[in-house]
Image (cartoon, rainbow, N blue to C red):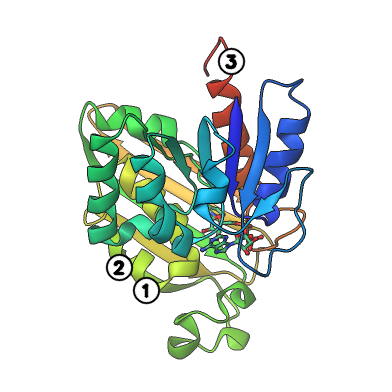
Amino acid sequence: MKIALVGNGAIAKLVSEFCATSAGRLTVVAALGLPSDVRSVGKHPIVQSLAELLAFNPDLVVECAGHSAVVAYATPVLEAGLDLVIVSTGSLADAALWQTVRTAASRSKGRVKLPAGALPGIDALSAARLAGLTTVTLRSSKPPKAWKGTPAEKTHDLDAITEPTVIFSGNARAAALTFPKNANVAATAALAGLGFEATTIMLVADPGITQNVHHLEAAGAFGSMTLRISANPSPDNPKTSHMAALSIMRLLENEASAIVI
Ligand SMILES: NC(=O)c1ccc[n+]([C@@H]2O[C@H](COP(=O)([O-])OP(=O)(O)OC[C@H]3O[C@@H](n4cnc5c(N)ncnc54)[C@H](O)[C@@H]3O)[C@@H](O)[C@H]2O)c1
């Protein structure tokens, strides 16, 4: 299977290393980057336009770049009839963009595939939805310094926080739009479960942790579940959980495999 990447960073590197170990089942043919991406993170060539990327005739395109890449490339990739994996799911909190992407996918033979990313239990949440969910709450905790450069700086003295402090509480759409750099897990929970309006998100600055900790609780006709992940960062990007790349690898493995799990 020929894979084209959009992005040339931490996730792209791990995914391309994984594909290189797949004994030819998964081949990264090229990656699309920004003009600053002059050196590829893998053995594949790096290009600067979608036309150049699609000229490699990929079977599937993996976005691992950021929200602006979803805005720029999701629709044309789908219009080209290709499957598209979107890891920057937070971009889909923009209702107009999500509608555009859904419309493009419904008219295309290509499909949008959303990996679990950094969040655990997306398979269970998505299955539970089929019987009816009543509540979904995600509590995402990070060390106080990880919230620097976000709107939390305006509402809290992050250097003075000595105990776990809720810096945002609201629905998934507000969380994703207010904290776009931390939006992906909120959006993935919403898309798999109860939607952006009905999913409750709490963002927490916790001086007692060094990892990012996501705590997902859901209830419904299926019963209830509690899932917690303490996520290690990617080797090349402390802001990205290693799980994000691993979840794409799992998706690609399933695409190329006789057994899907
Ligand atoms: N779903 C999740 O749980 C989850 C978790 C972590 C990260 N992510 C998403 O994955 C993205 C990539 O993560 P990363 O750690 O590899 O980031 P990174 O910063 O290491 O790499 C991003 C790469 O994409 C390129 N890029 C950015 N905008 C682009 C555009 N418009 N067109 C083409 N290339 C572009 C950059 O130049 C860089 O090469 C993040 O921006 C984030 O949105 C999702």
In this view, 166 is above or below 153 = above
Residue appearing at x 55%, y 82% in the figure = 149
Mark 3: few, some, or many residues within 10 Å (few <14, many ≥20)? few
The answer to which of 109 and 146 lies nearer the viewer is 109
Label 3 is placed on what type of residue? Ser
The answer to which of 253 and 231 lies nearer the viewer is 253
Mark closer to the observer (2, 3): 3
Instruction: Report how far apart the C-alphas of labels 3 and 1 lie in the structure.
Output: 39 Å
Label 2 is placed on what type of residue? Ala
Please report whichever mark, 3 or 1, sits nearer to the chain's N-terminal start.
1
The label shown at residue 174 is 2
Task: Give the secondary structure at mark 2.
Answer: helix
User: Can residue 192 be spotted in the picture?
Assistant: yes
Q: Is 66 positioned to the left or the right of 128 in the image?
A: right
Task: Tell me residue 244's x, y (percent).
Answer: 59, 46
Which residue is disc 3 drawn over? 257
Which residue is disc 1 drawn over? 178
Instruction: Report how far apart the C-alphas of labels 1 and 2 lie in the structure.
Output: 6 Å
Taking the image as four quarters, which one is ligand 1 found in?
bottom right
Task: Tell me residue 208's x, y (percent).
Answer: 65, 67
Q: Is 80 positioned to the left or the right of 120 in the image?
A: left
In this view, 73 is above or below 245 = below
Task: Give the secondary structure at mark 1.
Answer: helix
